[in-house]
Amino acid sequence: MTHETRSPNSFSVPMPITEAAHQMAQTFASQQPTPGKREQIYRNTLAVYAVHHYLQLLGIPTDLSAGDCWNPMVRLALDVADLEVTGRGRLECRPVEPDQAVCMIPTEAQVDRIGYIVVEIDAAQQEATLLGFVDQVSGTALGLRELRSLTQFPAYLQQVQPKIVLSQWFEGIFYGAWQILEAVFTRQPQDIAWAGLGNLRSAQIRRAKTLDLGLLLNQKTVALVIALQSEVSETPAVGNITVLIQVLPMGKEEHLPPGLKLKVNLESEQAEVEARAADNLIQLEFSEPPGTPVTVQVQLADTLVTEEFIV
């Protein structure tokens, strides 16, 4: 059998395996039913900790507990080693053995990831070595010769668009151009169509941003409005979140351009609404648990604006 070898020029970063990392990995592993699963969880946890410490050194904030690998039920069912990079998304931190030439990427770790860092775990030497990264994978086998140098990683991460996690809005965490409604609309709230909608008025969180559809609107803009209501108001991250999405005209315009479409794509369903000649808004509403990916599209003829969210 022929084995692939690593590139001798690959850049790697050694990180010590701390006592805290060992203890957490052992705790997670001890909860598993089989020796194989215990070993998997142990190594995955060490890999996540190593990447977490590396990003801390770079001044890049992370949230260890936000990943699926910190969820006991998910750990048991899936092989994931994800780390939430605050405001960016999830990195997959895949462990490999010393001198291993190929890193296996489970199918469940190939979605909702902004990148993959491969970590060599040498438990005997109390050391984890970050071997490199890729921004995406195309299958379950990643050859280590394909890894990019970690010297390129900070610049790559800067290019990753901040991920809009709607449930974080309840915590006052906002990214991108989302503003309070009064900062987007020049008219008073009582003069705007959405002010009369009970669902939106009672929403816990309301934010808006302008969308430029270019020449099709004669350089005018419309506004995309998102309103959130948690079914469990004291703990928004527990129950479903009701999301109301609207498109409204801006400035002195009273109506949307006919044919303007609002589309919402969820994992389980799709919905679409189209503006008619006298419509002053179009809207769609859904209720999903936190963590659900959603794609919102606003389209006029061939011009399409897409927004990606996580509920």
Image (cartoon, grey):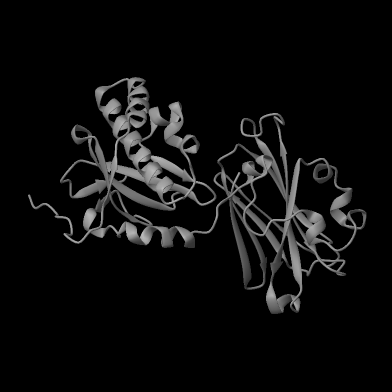
Whether residue 273 sits left or right of residue 93 in the image: it is right
> Residue at 32% of width from left, 20% of height from top?
33
* Quadrant of the frame with the C terminus: top right
Give the residue at x 82% y 56%.
182
Question: Viewed as shown, does residue 245 lie left or right of 88?
Answer: right
Q: 9 or 291, which lies in front?
A: 9
Taking 1 as reference, is 252 above or below it?
below
Q: Position of residue 120 (x, y in %)?
A: 24, 43
x and y percentages locating residue 39 in the rendered image: 26, 29
Q: Is residue 31 above or below residue 22?
A: above
As rendered, which of 240 and 40 lies closer to the eye? 40
Classify residue 55 as left or right of residue 97: right
**Residue 158 versus residue 287 in the image, above or below:** below
Quadrant hosting residue 154: bottom left
Front one among 244 and 272: 244
93 over 34 or under it: above or below? below
**Occupied quadrant, residue 24:** top left
Q: Position of residue 204 (x, y in %)?
A: 76, 40
In the figure, is residue 248 to the left or right of 106? right
Where residue 215 appears, as percent x and y from the top left, is 70, 79
Can you name the residue that lies furthest to the right here?
Answer: 190
